[in-house]
Image: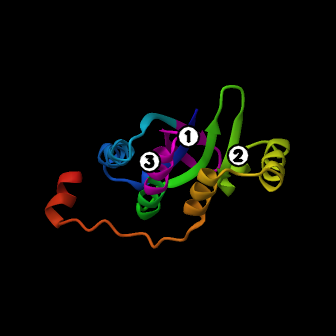
Amino acid sequence: MCYTFELSFNVYKHLNITFFENTVKNMVIECGGTYEIHYESNENKWKLHTCIITAQFEQTTEGTNNCTLFIKKVKETPQLHIESIYEENSNKIDMLYASNYYLQQLDEYSAKNIKENNKKRSYSEGQIRIINAVNKVVKKKRLDISYEEYLKML
């Protein structure tokens, strides 16, 4: 039983993908989670190459605190997006949050089903804290790096 986060970033918008990927990995580890990374490509009107990072956190009080801290760090990081948050139990998955982009990628029935279930269901205290952390607006900080660090990234 754990909370699972799916994060994404556009590979083309970063000069050094490995550096950014390692930054996100370190954020997950600092907050007490585990991660998996994979890449997806979509070639329709625009070429889109996306890195998907799946982070998992324990479903305990400490795990919920770690989740809210992680959400805050993600929201402060430019170009990193939370696509979905769900809770995995032994026999079912409860979707806590899904971005508009994530819902558009699903078929119409699934997206409608997720929206209706989120309106009807009741949430635990930990789930409410996570949802409130996602919905809270945070100003994103710019990564202030020196010119030498910038050149190293190239």
Circle 2: is it few (<14), some (14-19), or many (20+) Cα within 10 Å?
Answer: few
Q: Is residue 48 magenta?
A: yes
State how far apart marks 1 and 3 are (Cα): 22 Å
Q: Residue at x 33, y 46 (%)?
A: 30
Q: Is residue 56 magenta?
A: yes
Q: Nearer the viewer, mark 1 or mark 2?
A: 1
Q: Is residue 92 left or right of residue 48?
A: right
Mark 1 or 3, closer to the camera: 1
Mark 3: which secondary structure?
Answer: helix
Mark 2 is on which residue type?
A: Gln
Amino acid under disc 1: Thr
As rendered, which of 61 and 129 lies closer to the eye? 61
**Figure quadrant of the N terminus:** top right
List x then y, in percent, for residue 84.
61, 47
Which residue is painted at 60% across and 47% down in the image? 85
Cα separation between marks 3 and 2: 18 Å
Q: Which residues are magenta?
A: 40-69
> Does residue 68 appear left or right of residue 89 in this picture?
left
Q: Sequence order check: which comes first, mark 1 or mark 3?
A: 1
Colour scheme of the picture: rainbow
Q: Is residue 141 left or right of residue 145?
A: right
Reading the image, the residue beneath label 3 is: 11
Disc number for residue 105: 2
Q: Is residue 61 left or right of residue 96?
A: left
Residue 4: assigned label: 1
Q: Is residue 1 visible?
A: yes
Q: What kind of element bears circle 1?
A: strand
Nearer the observer, 139 or 58: 58
Q: Measured from the top left, where is residue 82 in percent x and y?
A: 55, 53
User: Three-letter amino acid code at disc 3?
Assistant: Val
Q: CA distance from mark 1 to mark 2?
A: 19 Å
